Structures are given as C-alpha cells and as structure tokens.
Image (tube, helix red, strand yellow):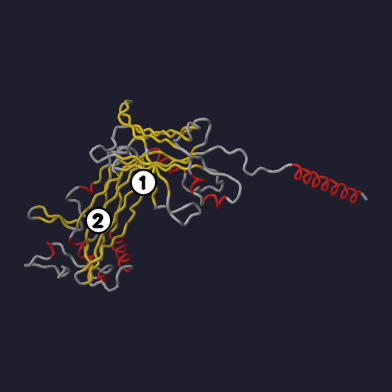
Amino acid sequence: MDTNLNMKKYFSGLLLLVSILAFQSCKEEVDLIGNFEETAIVYGLLDKADSVHMVKINRAFIGPGNSIEIAAIPDSNYFDELVVTVEEYVANSLQRTWTLGDTLVDDKDENGIFFAPQQKLYFFETPPSAPLLDDAIYKLHIDVNNGEFEVTAETEIVSGMIVDASSQNYTMRFAQNPGEYNTTNLGVGSGNAFQINTTLTTNYREWTGSTFVDRSFSWNLGEKETSPGENLNFAATGETFYNLMKTSCEGGDPLADRRTFVSFDVVVTGGAEELYNYILVNKPSSSLAQSKPTYTNLSATNDHPVIGIFSSRQTLRVNKPFYLSTGQAFIRALDQKSTQELCIGGITGPFLFCSDHPGDNVATNPQPYACP
C-alpha cells in the first residue's frame, strides 16, 4: 500500500514538473543570439626579409539564420570601416608611420565553409633600401567603425639569425661509401628568436632529349624551441635524402631519359616570443580535460573582445648551386661521393641521374656517372 502511494506521489511530482516546464516554454523564448559584441580577429607577422607586409583583419559574425550560409558571405566577415596604422619606434622615438591600404588576394583555400578564394588584406610596403629595423618596436593601431573601439599591439623584430650553410664552402655530405650514409648538420644561430624551423628544398631537372622540366621537393628538418643567442643543429640524414629523391622521381615523367641535380635551398624561419607563445597555446591538447588557456598580445578598448596575434619572424633563404666557380676551383653543394651515390647508388640509381659537374667530367679522368 505504501509502495503504491509513493509511486503516485512520484508520478504526480513528475507531471507537475513537466507542466511547469511546458508553461515556461510557452511564456519565454530562448534568444540564441543574445547580446553580441563586435569582436576583432587580427593576424599579422612582420618579416624584415619582406618588402610587403600583410595584416588580416576580420570580425566575428552572428545573426539569424544558418551560420554556414552567413560564413560564405564576405561582408559578414568584415567591419564597415577600418583605419589601420603601423608605427616604428627606436629608443621610444617615433621614426616612421604607415597607413595601411587594403587589397584583395585570390589565395584563400576553397575547401572550407568560409568565403573563398578572394579575401581582403591590409598592407604596407618597405622598399629594399629602407627595410624594417632590427632594433625597432612596431606598434599596430586599428580604429574600428569610426571610434566604436580600437585594437592595439606591438612587437619587436626577429633578427640576428645566422646559418652556416650561407658559407661559400658549405657542402652537403650524404654518403661515405656506396650504401653507407652520412648525416649533415645544418647549424643555426637563433638571434633573438624563440622558435626555429628549418626546411631543405632539393631542386633537380628531368631531361627528355634537349628539353627539361624543373622539379623539386621540400624536406622539413624540424622545428625547435630556443632562446636568444643559442646555437642549434638540424640533422639531414643521407638515407632520408635519397629516399625522398626516389619518391619525387617516381612522381615525375616516366619518359625522362636523364636527371641532373641543380641546387639546394635552405630556408630557416625564426619566430618572436609572442608568436612562440601563441603557437604553444594553440597546440592540440593531450589532456582528457580539453580546457585550454587562450593567448593574444592584442588588446581592445571599450571591453570589446579580440583574438589573434601581431608578431614577427625572420626568414633566411640560402641557395646552394650544385657547383660554383671560384677561379680554378668548383665548389660543390653536394660532395663527390654523395653525387656518385645519387647517380649509381642503390636507392636513386635506377632514375638515370648523371652529373654535369665540371669536376666529374674532366677529359683526362671522366667519372662513370658523368653526363655524356
């Protein structure tokens, strides 16, 4: 008897709760949009190696209807009016001021839900004769919609990096004897960077008779955290080099009758401390509790939210041609034993490489792998 009474009380209470919720749903509407604050999304990286400097500025959007459809409308992603400036300070003294113009570029990925391929970017230019300065502070200022709010940030310039591959006598040594591989270390001085990435691009030619096609592949040697003034080594292993070359050739012209090595491009990029912090915070979480902090060095007035980064990087590019004539000598970017392994070694030998290095085709002592 008590059990039946308890069950009746339970169901009566449940019906009362359902009735209250139903009544409230009739009297109150849930506002999915709520109070929306204009939010700026800003990304800019200054690089003293560049003569054109770009800043991307968008707004977070909200509105009635399908958000995916809204994302495909460019105007929904831009502010009505922006005045963007960058100021250069040396020892707290203003040196130069740039008012950024806007331009449309067609390089945006079309595989996402947002509008593409065209996007608006803001830019300013520094001619090669007057580049960004190593010892300067650069301050970004954005006036949004005639003073509705302002966005500001500042950054130092990454500078002082050095690469030992820039030495004229630097040579890649990937092989010692047939089938025996070496590791070549690329040394990098960090300057004032906090993170360094190094990439090695190999350029070669595929010949069919007297015509050729230039081909290449890029090899990311890694990214390392660092501190200003440190020296780093990035290892390039010989066996990996030949296997990457093999893979690249397999995707080339099957009718090519020979291939020749052309050059290496060493590209080293160093990031400022703000950029390092931004990348670190935005790495995928390895914790089961997926909560992550946020980081930006941007700030906005009138309590408006802002996300993104305004920072700097330095990019060093060194081209190492297969051979460089210095008087009577020919300096090699790829040493002779490594060239031999490329041409007649077990990994890349079947791909018809030959050497057009003058030192390999001396009339009195031509090498068996020299080009005819």
Viewer-closest of 95 and 265? 95
Name which of mark 1 and mark 2 comes first in the sequence: 1
How many marks the image carries: the answer is: 2
Q: Looking at the figure, which quarter contains the C terminus?
A: bottom left
| Label 2, residues with CA under 10 Å away: few <14, some 14-19, many ≥20 | many
The residue carrying mark 1 is: 224
Residue 330 in the image: x percent, y percent? Answer: 12, 56
In the displayed structure, would residue 245 be above or below residue 66?
below
Residue 6 in the image: x percent, y percent? Answer: 88, 48
**CB atoms of marks 1 and 2 within 8 Å:** no
Residue 4 in the image: x percent, y percent? Answer: 90, 51
What is the three-letter code of the residue carrying label 2? Phe
Q: In the displayed structure, does residue 86 sit left or right of residue 242?
A: right
Location of residue 231 by image quarter:
top left
- Say which element carries label 1: strand
User: How far apart are the alpha carbons under marks 1 and 2?
Assistant: 21 Å
Residue 98 in the image: x percent, y percent? Answer: 34, 35
Location of residue 230 by image quarter:
top left
- Say which element carries label 2: strand
Residue at 30% across, 67% down: 249
The residue carrying mark 2 is: 264
Q: In the displayed structure, does residue 305 sit left or right of residue 251?
A: right
